[in-house]
Image (tube, rainbow, N blue to C red):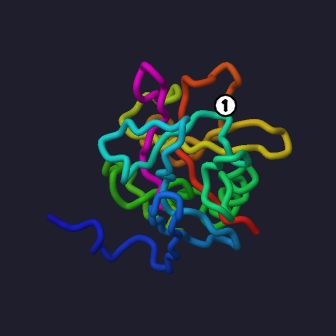
Amino acid sequence: CVSEEKVAYGYKGTYGTLVDERDSHEYRTVEINGTTWMAENLKYESKNSTCNKDSCDIYGLHYTYPFDSTGSNPLCPDGWHVSTTADWDSLLAFVRANDSATYALDLRYTFRWPSYSQGGDTYGMGIIPNTCYRYNDGYDLANVSDEAVACIGAEDVEKKGGYYYIMSSTQVNSVYKYVYKRTINKSDGDHYRFGIRCVKDK
């Protein structure tokens, strides 16, 4: 049995750390192309969060949209914000420019995905299949029928809208090689919940 913490491959750079003073959770952070990201999904409990996976400490919590990023009880720690579409689009453009054929795999963690779509974790983002959560129905795969899906919410600050970024391990039509951006509809309300990555303010 091999310990995940001692495996030598994957990201070779340096992680930082962030301690959330509200609940003492410690997160790994990583800087990619001038932007500092949480290298793990958020685990902060709020009134709009759900923990419904076999290990919330690994997969993080799921949150309803609109994400309370600027109110009296923001989701992210002080000095950080819920990742925006600008953050994600910039990250994806940077990663695609370096390797357009494998960019999605380059963002995935080296464990927890099916063997045929395990990630290389080239940049240290460590994205894992937390899935998209749908209230009452359990985990919704957002029209991608497969066993492993990563689903992370984001905000479009200018348009005041919500989106989520999804990647799947399905081999059908090579979907597993891509990252898709989808709209969070207002009608979704409480029914859908998403993982969150926080980004350091500049």
Pointer 1 local density, CA inside 10 Å: few below 14, some 14–19, many at least 20: many
From this viewpoint, is residue 134 visible?
yes
In the orientation shown, which residue stands out farthest toward the right?
A: 158
Q: Quadrant of the N terminus?
A: bottom left
- Residue at the image point whose x is 49% and y is 34% from the top: 132
Task: Please identify the quadrant where the C terminus is shown.
Answer: bottom right
Q: Quadrant of residue 198?
A: bottom right
Residue 79 x/y as whole percent:
68, 65
Apparent side of residue 142 relative to residue 55 in the rendered image (left or right): right
Name the quadrant containing residue 103. Answer: bottom right
Residue 35 falls inside the magenta stretch: no
Q: Relative to the observer, which residue lies in front, 179 or 35?
A: 35
Q: How far across and down, in percent of the image, does residue 48 sit?
A: 55, 35
**Is residue 136 shown left or right of residue 158?**
left
Please state which of residues 109 and 65 is positioned toward the viewer in this rendering: 65
Residue sitting farthest toward the left: 1
Q: Residue at x 73, y 48 (%)?
A: 70
Task: Please tell me whether mark 1 sits on a helix, a strand or a loop.
Answer: strand
Asked whether 135 falls inside the magenta stretch, the response is yes
Examine the residues drawn in magenta and state their main secondary structure.
loop
Query: Which residue is identified by label 1?
Result: 184
Residue 12 percent across, percent down from the top left: 45, 79
Q: From this viewpoint, is residue 174 visible? A: no
Residue 53 drawn above or below residue 137? below
For image coordinates 45% across by 35% down, the residue present is: 172
Q: Residue at x 57, y 54 (%)?
A: 197
- Number of labels in the image equals 1
Magenta stretch? 126-140
Amino acid marked by disc 1: Ile
Can you give x and y, in whole percent of width and height, for residue 11 in the image?
Answer: 45, 73
